[in-house]
Image (cartoon, rainbow, N blue to C red):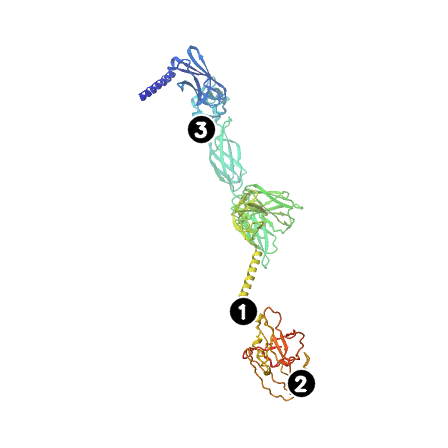
Amino acid sequence: MARHGAGTLFLLWLSLLWSVRLGGTLRCALVALGSSVVPLGSAIMASCTIRLEFCHGLEEGKVWITWMLDNEPMAGSQHRGPGGTEVSNLTLAQFNRTQAKLWCLVEWNGAKQRVGMAEIRAGYPPAKPFNLSCVLNLSTYGLTCQWEQGPDSLLPTNVTLQCAQSRAPAVTGCTPQGGGRVCTVPRRLLQLYREMELWVSATNALGTAESERLRIDPMDVAKLDPPALQSIQSIPFQTDCITLAWELSHSTVHMELECELRYRAPEDPAWALVTGIVGQAGTTQRCGFLFGTRYHFQMRCRRSSARGYWSEWSPGRNYTTHEKAPTGKLDAWWSTRLAGTGGQLEVQLRWKALRWQEANGRVLGYCVTLSPRRRGRDPPAVCNTTHTQCNFSAPAGTRRVYLSAYNAAGESAATEVVLLERKGQPVAGLWAVSGGEHSLCVHWEAPPAPPAAYILEWQRVSSAPGGCSACWQMEQDGATTTALIQDGIEPFQRYNISLYPLYNHAVGVPVHTTAYSKQKAPSDAPKLHLKSISKSSAELCWDPVPVEMQNGFITGYTIFWANSVAEVASTAVNPTLSSFVIQDLKPSTLYRVHIMASTAAGSTNGTSLTLVTTVLDDNEIQFLFLTLGLIFVLFILLLICFQKNGRVKQQFWPSVPDPANSSLGKWVPAELQQEPLSVPGVREPGLATISTVTVLERAAGKQPPPWGKEPSPEPAAPAVPQPYVRQEGPGRAGRGWAVPEHPRGPAETVQYARVVGEGYTGQQQGPPRLYLRSSSAQPLLPEPSPGPERYGNLWFHRGEGGCPEELPATFPLLQGLRIGGAEEPRDCWAF
C-alpha cells in the first residue's frame, strides 16, 4: 500500500509539472522587455505576467514569482494585474553582460519552476570604417577594395561595400566573407574611365555607420603589370655608362606610361633612383657607374596621365661594369726591429683593402717594393701577396717602402710608406666605453702638438699576439678625439686598445687601455685551495679566473664560510689578491667555504671547500712533541740506569771496603793477644770498619816529626831482618800482618793505640772517620774526654793505578799497613 501511494504521488507531480510546462507553452507566462538588444552598461526593465487560466494547478492568491539572470537570482516586485493575472516587474540598473538569459519562475509545492524566458544582448553601435582604398586589376578588371574597421561592437554587424555610378542609385558592390575587410566589385558594376562613388556601410541592432565616400575613376587606380628587363650593355668608349632595354606587358602596350629605374651595388646601403623614363621608348642610357662593379637593376611603370599605383618592381637583373686599374691611396701601418748581427731590418707591414669605389674591379693582389717604379724599370718586389699584411727583411737604414694594388686592368700608383721612429709625444689620456654589443667607442685627450693622424689598434686578450691583421684603423683627422671600433668586436670579450699619434717626422709613443663591449656574470669562479690551517685561522689561495671566462672586469671576490650550526660569515677581497686568511675560527670545527667572483653585471659562486680546524697550533704541537720527546729520553735513561745498576752504582756510589775484614782488623801483637779490646758502642753498620791499629815500636829518644814534615836523616844502621808475626784472634776474620821491628837499633817498648772505624752509610756525609785509643797509661795522642777521640783531619781515599809499594812518609807508623778482607787485596788505601 505504501509503495502504491508513493507511485500515485509521483504521477500526480509529473502531471502537474507537465501541465505547468504545457501551460507555459500556451502562454501561461509572458516575459516582456523594453528591448532585447541594449547598449552595454545601460538599464533594463522587464515584466513577467502569469495568467492563471493557462497555468493549471496554480491557485489564485498563492502564486510567488521570482527571477534569474542566467543562474543568478534577482528580486522583483509582484502585484496583481488585470484579469486575475499576477505581474512581477524587474529593473536592472546596469547590464554589463554581452549576452544573457532572463528567466521568470513560479513556486509550487516548495519548488521553483521556470515558466518564461527572454534573451538579452548588449554591445555598441558599429564603428565608422576608414582608410578605404581600391585597386583595379587589369587582368580581370575587378576592383578590389580594402578598409579598416574600428573597435568591435560586440553585436552581429552587417558590412557591405556600396557603390554608385553617376546618375544611378547606390547598389551593393560586394560583401566581405567571414567578417573580413576586403572584397572585390565585379566588372559589371564598374564604369571605366568615369568617376564612381564607393563607401563602406556597417549596420547592427544599435545603428549604422558609413565610411568617407571615395570618388575615383577605376582606371586611375589600375595597377599595371611590371616591364621585363631585356639587356644591359656598356658603351665601349665610355666605360662608366650603360644602355638598358626593356619590354612592356601586353595589357599596357596601348597606354602611355612613365617608368622608374633603380640600381645599387652590393656595398651600397640604398638604391640609386632614375625617374622620368618614357615607357614606350624601350631603351635608356645612364652614366656615372663605377668600374668593375656589379650592379643590380629593377624597373616599374604606371599610367603617365594618372596618379595611380605603380606596378610592382620587375625581376632584378645583374650587370658588372668594365674594369680599370685601381685608384686611391692605401692606408698602411708597420712595425720594425733589427734582427741578428747582420743589421737586417725586419718589417711587418699591414694595410687596409681598397674600398670598392677605388678598386675599379676585383683586386688580384698587392705588391711591396723598396724603391718606386719608374718608366722603363720595375724594381724587384720584396712581397707579392693577396693578403693585407706582409713580413719581409730590408737593409738597415731603410726608411721608405712602396705599396701598390693591381687587378686585371692594371696596377695602382704606389703608396709611399715612411717607416718613422716611435718617439713622438703620446696622447694625454685614453679610455673606451661600450658602443653596443659589437662596437667600442674610444676617447682620448689630444697631445700638446697636434698630430696629422692617429692609428688605433685593438686585440682580443685571449687571441694570439699579431694574429689579427685587420684589428687596426687609421683616423685621418688629426683634430678628432674619438673613434668607433666595429670590426671583430664580440660581447663578453676583453680587448686591449692602443693609440698612436702620427706626426710628420715621428710616431707617438702608444697609450693603452682595456674595455668590454658588454659584460655579464663570470662563467666560472676560482677554485679554492687550502694553504695552511690552525685552530683559529685558515689560509686560502686560488688561481685567477681565465680571462676568457671572466666576461667582464672582476670587481672583487667575496668569501663565505659557515660551520655546522649554520653560522655564516663573509668578507670582501680585493680582486688583485689571490690568497686570504680567515681569522677567528673555532678549534676542531668543520667549515664549508666558497668564493664568489663578481663583475659589474653579476656574480658567480664557486664550488665549496670543506675544512676542519685543528685542536692545537703548530707551535703548541711542536712544544708538545718536544716535551714528549724529552720525557721519552728521560724514560730511556732511567731504564738504562736500572738495567746497568752495578755500573751506575759504582760511578756514583763506589764500594767502600769493610774494615772488619781488613788485615788491620785481624792483626794484634803477641803481647796483646789476651788483652780484652774495648770497642765503641755498636753503631750503624757501614760498608767499611777498621778494627785496630797498634803502634809497635819507636826509636828510643826520638820523637816523631811534626805532621807534614820529612824526618831528618840519620846514620844508616844495618837492617836486621825481623820476623812477621801473624795473629788470629777471636772475632777476627781474614788475616792480619805484623809490623817488623824498627831497623835502627834496639827497640823500646812503645805505646800502642787502637783505631776504631765508625760505620759508613749512605746517610752519613763525608768520608769514614778513625778513632784512636791509647792502650797504656801514657796515651799516644791527647784524649780530652773519655772514649775515642774524633779526628777530623784523618781521612783516606781509594788509590788509583794499583797499590803503592809503601805508604806516604807522613804516616811512618802506618807504613806497610794493608787493609782488606780478601786473600789477595785488590785495593790499596792511604790514610
Q: Quadrant of residue 757?
A: bottom right
Mark 3–mark 1 distance (CA, rounded to whole Å) = 140 Å
**Towards the viewer: 292 or 663:** 663
Report the mark closest to the observer, 1 or 2.
2
The residue beneath circle 3 is: 251
| Percent position of residue 559, x then y | 56, 47
Mark 1–mark 2 distance (CA, rounded to whole Å) = 54 Å
- Secondary structure of the residue carrying tag 3 is helix
At label 1, counting other C-alpha atoms closer than 10 Å, the crowd grade (few under 14, some 14-19, many 20 or more) is few
**Numbered badge on residue 700:** 2
Looking at the rendered structure, the kind of residue marked 3 is Ser
Report the mark closest to the observer, 3 or 2.
2
Name which of mark 3 and mark 1 comes first in the sequence. Answer: 3
The residue beneath circle 1 is: 645
Name which of mark 1 and mark 2 comes first in the sequence. Answer: 1
At label 2, counting other C-alpha atoms closer than 10 Å, the crowd grade (few under 14, some 14-19, many 20 or more) is few
- Secondary structure of the residue carrying tag 2 is loop
